Image: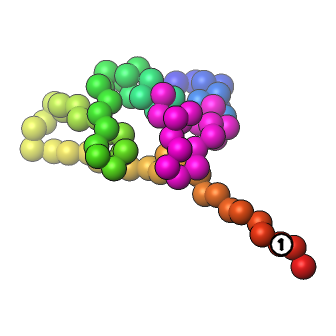
Amino acid sequence: MTREETLDLLTRLCQAHSPGGYDAEIDPLVTDLFGQYGGACQRDPAGNLFVLRPGRQPDRRVIVTAHKDELGVIVKRVD
């Protein structure tokens, strides 16, 4: 992946609206990204997305985790 492609991907992911519990905009981006690397995206009952991909060495595993939601704050007053 080139530097420009990486920056484009990060821009798209960072601009996606994704407050906790409202993943309708970020989920398709993440699912598409997983699909580009040969993985079928799955969802667990909590709404987490994951991909299981067989490796070349069955006794070794790599696990990558990340948050797909953004932190949200509601300002109730300013003093």
Compared to 62, does 32 lie above or below? above
Q: Is residue 15 magenta?
A: yes
Q: Which residues are magenta?
A: 12-28
Q: Position of residue 9 (x, y in %)?
A: 59, 30
Taking depth in this image into account, of 54 and 31 the one nearest to the observer is: 31
| Label 1: few (<14), some (14–19) or many (≥20) C-alpha neighbours in 10 Å | few
- Residue 34 in percent (x, y) is at 39, 28
Farthest residue, direction left: 59
Q: Residue at x 78, y 69 (%)?
A: 76
Determine if residue 33 is in view. Answer: no
Q: Quadrant of the C terminus?
A: bottom right
Q: In this view, which residue lies farthest toward the front?
A: 76
In the image, farthest residue toward the bottom: 79
- Name the residue located 58 percent from the left edge and 44 percent from the top edge: 18
Which residue is at the front of the view, 11 or 56?
Answer: 11
Q: Position of residue 71 (x, y in %)?
A: 61, 57
Q: Quadrant of residue 50?
A: top left
For the point 29% across and 46% down, the residue is 45
The answer to whether 29 appears left or right of 14 in the picture is: left
**What percent of the width, then of the height, locates residue 49?**
36, 40
Q: Is residue 10 shown in magenta?
A: no
User: How many marks overall?
Assistant: 1
Write down the quadrant of residue 72 in the picture.
Answer: bottom right
Circle 1 residue: 77
What's the image's color scheme? rainbow
Residue type pointed to by label 1: Arg
Q: Does residue 69 appear left or right of residue 59 in this picture? A: right
Q: Would residue 63 appear left or right of 5 to someone viewing this image?
A: left
Q: Residue at x 42, y 28 (%)?
A: 31
Q: Secondary structure at mark 1?
A: loop
